[in-house]
């Protein structure tokens, strides 16, 4: 199926989502967000897709966030009568039931909503050219797609507040130093690095990975004891999966496990 604002392909168990508006630094208007939300719906519902990689087309930007020119001109709106898809900005910032892992391959500027999309991912691999920021207050807006809440949870508070209150951005190396980014690589090695992270995830049992993400995310705001004793759907699914037997058996037989993901 052709897409207008993104490319979407699956290779093996990996889904690749690429924002494809390089002429506007991959900024998004409502039509683009709507399309991306449909892609994330497909990834969530495809049992053969175990990991996703999100990136932006071109060499300049992951995403510059909200397409302010489109907002000002009134273009890029959903046709009248179209029901907006759930999922928030880019179809991912307000998606709370996606327990499959998502890797952001940040290839350049990740500003505003672009930064918020990266923050909504589980792992961030950044090009040495990447920059992260929430500049919304500088244009009379605020980072309402989760940025003002996710950033203080993913950075030291004073660093996060300095970015939020001034709209200033940070480079990839600074983001890595503060733990916002998992790895910084030369620009031409970004795709290879993201694929390497995806391959390492695929070495693990997919339902165990899904349950581990669900438990980690849903337990974050709970005290330790109730977080440990809470029931998690995907961990229960994994415990009933043949992969629960396959893992220890493959280990004892000194071979690679053959995961089914069911």
Image: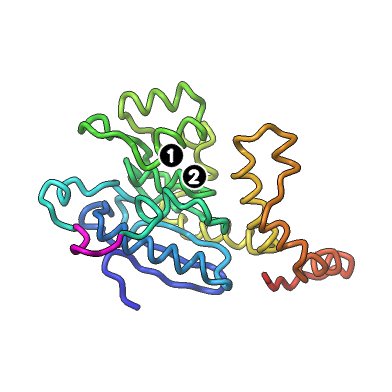
Span of residues in magenta: 77-83
| Residue ID at (60%, 35%) | 221
| Residue ID at (50%, 60%) | 192
Is 221 located above or below residue 214 in the figure? above
Count of numbered labels shown in the rendering: 2
Residue 172: numbered disc: 1
Residue 222's spot in the image, x, y percent? 64, 35
Secondary-structure class at tag 2: strand
Q: Is residue 247 left or right of residue 5?
A: right
Dots 1, 2 in contact, CB < 8 A: yes
Image quadrant where residue 139 sits: top left
Residue 162's spot in the image, x, y percent? 39, 23
Is 7 located above or below residue 99 in the figure? below
For the C terminus, the image quarter is: bottom right
Q: Is residue 62 left or right of residue 43?
A: left
| Residue ID at (50%, 38%) | 180
In this view, the residue farthest toward the top is 158
| Residue ID at (15%, 48%) | 69
Q: Main secondary structure of the magenta part?
A: loop
Check disc 1: other Cα within 10 Å, few if <14, some if 14-19, many if 20+.
Answer: many
In this view, the residue farthest toward the right is 252
Looking at the image, tell me whether mark 1 or mark 2 is earlier in sequence order.
1
Asked if the magenta segment contains residue 62, the reply would be: no
Residue 31's spot in the image, x, y percent? 25, 60
Asked if the magenta segment contains residue 80, the reply would be: yes
Of residue 210 and residue 94, the one placed in the foreground of this image is 94
Q: CA distance from mark 1 to mark 2?
A: 7 Å
Secondary-structure class at tag 1: helix
In this view, the residue farthest toward the bottom is 1
Residue labelled with disc 2: 184
Residue 224: numbered disc: none
């Amino acid at each position: 199926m052709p897409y207008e604002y993104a490319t979407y392909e699956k290779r093996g168990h990996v889904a690749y989502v690429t924002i494809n508006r390089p002429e506007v630094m991959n900024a998004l208007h409502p039509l683009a967000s709507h399309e991306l939300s449909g892609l994330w719906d497909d990834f969530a519902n495809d049992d053969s897709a175990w990991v996703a990689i999100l990136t932006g087309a071109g060499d300049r930007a992951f995403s510059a966030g909200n397409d302010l020119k489109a907002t000002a001109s009134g273009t890029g709106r959903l046709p009248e009568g179209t029901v907006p898809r759930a999922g928030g900005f880019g179809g991912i910032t307000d998606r709370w039931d996606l327990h499959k892992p998502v890797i952001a391959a940040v290839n350049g500027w990740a500003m505003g909503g672009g930064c918020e999309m990266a923050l909504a991912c589980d792992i961030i691999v950044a090009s040495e050219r990447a920059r992260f920021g929430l500049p919304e207050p500088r244009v009379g807006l605020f980072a309402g797609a989760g940025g003002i809440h996710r950033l203080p949870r993913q950075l030291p508070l004073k660093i996060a507040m300095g970015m939020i209150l001034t709209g200033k951005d940070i480079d990839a190396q600074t983001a890595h130093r503060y733990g916002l980014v998992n790895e910084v690589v030369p620009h031409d090695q970004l795709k290879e690095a993201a694929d390497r992270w995806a391959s390492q995830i695929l070495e693990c049992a997919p339902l165990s990975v899904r349950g581990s993400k669900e438990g980690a995310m849903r337990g974050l705001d709970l005290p330790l004891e109730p977080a440990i004793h809470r029931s998690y759907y995907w961990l229960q699914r994994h415990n009933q999966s043949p992969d629960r037997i396959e893992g220890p058996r493959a280990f004892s037989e000194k071979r690679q496990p053959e995961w089914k993901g069911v």
